[in-house]
Amino acid sequence: MTEELKIRKLYTVMDEVLSEGDLTLETPIKRAVAIAVIKNPFANSYQDDLSTLSNYGEPLGELLSANALKGLGISDGSEVESYGKAVIVGLKGEIEHGHAIIHPKIGAPFRNAIGGADKARAVIPSTGKIGGPGTSIDVPVHYKDSEWVVTHADTITVMVPDAPYEDEILVALAITTGGRPNARIPGLQKEAVL
């Protein structure tokens, strides 16, 4: 069964962290999450072959990474330091439906948008859950060249008030221009992996 990708809504959230604790940041950290709310062609029905959903990954990766960059106000990914992805599947779907979208094919276009696989070498952190309209999700992010860089391990919480409906899937890609504000715990630093 091959179904055309149907997007009901695009949503982009951006924030800019200017200070943390009592300290003003020398360089503010921008964070953006681009979201697509799509129709789940397998809602309320079991399918062994989830390749239709996997094939949605590539166009969603291109669209959402471009929207996230636009949300940060940058045209290329050279300023991006961290990335992550998440999915919320509506109540008539299976968690596997969401993972079919965010694992096999979404990564390549996402990496290409922020400099290519040689500039984004780390696994893209991800999470998924089942939920209804207004469900929030913590999108995990970490340094794009190594998941072991301690200063960049973080989450960005997002939600869309009217999504996902029972027969929808919410797909989110997140990017940032820095790690946690005033990060200072010991461990691997980004300079060690450049």
Image (cartoon, rainbow, N blue to C red):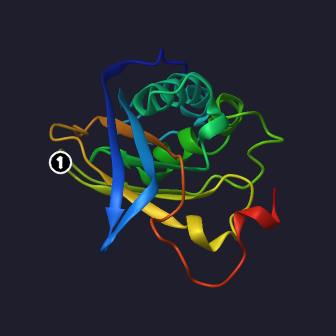
Q: Is residue 189 left or right of residue 183?
A: right
Residue 12 image point, x, y percent? 34, 32
Residue 92 x/y as whole percent: 29, 44
Q: Residue furthest top?
A: 4
Looking at the image, the residue that sits furthest to the bottom is 186
Residue 35, image x and y in percent?
38, 35
The C terminus is located in which quarter? bottom right
x, y percent for residue 6: 39, 18
* Element assignment for label 1: loop
Does residue 136 lie above or below 35 as drawn? below
Q: Nearer the viewer, residue 97 or 141?
A: 141
> Neighbour class for label 1 at 10 Å: few (<14), some, many (≥20)?
some
Three-letter residue code for mark 1? Gly
**Residue at 22% from the left image edge and 53% from the top image edge:** 135
Residue at 36%, 28% in the rendered image: 38
**Quarter-of-image position of residue 24:** bottom left
Vertical side of 70 occupied by 20: above or below: below
Q: Which residue is mark 1?
A: 134
Q: For the point 69% across and 37% down, which residue is it? A: 111
- Residue at x 29% of width, y 44% of height: 90
In the rendered image, the quadrant that contains the N terminus is: top right
Seen from the viewer's position, the closer of residues 158 and 86 is: 158
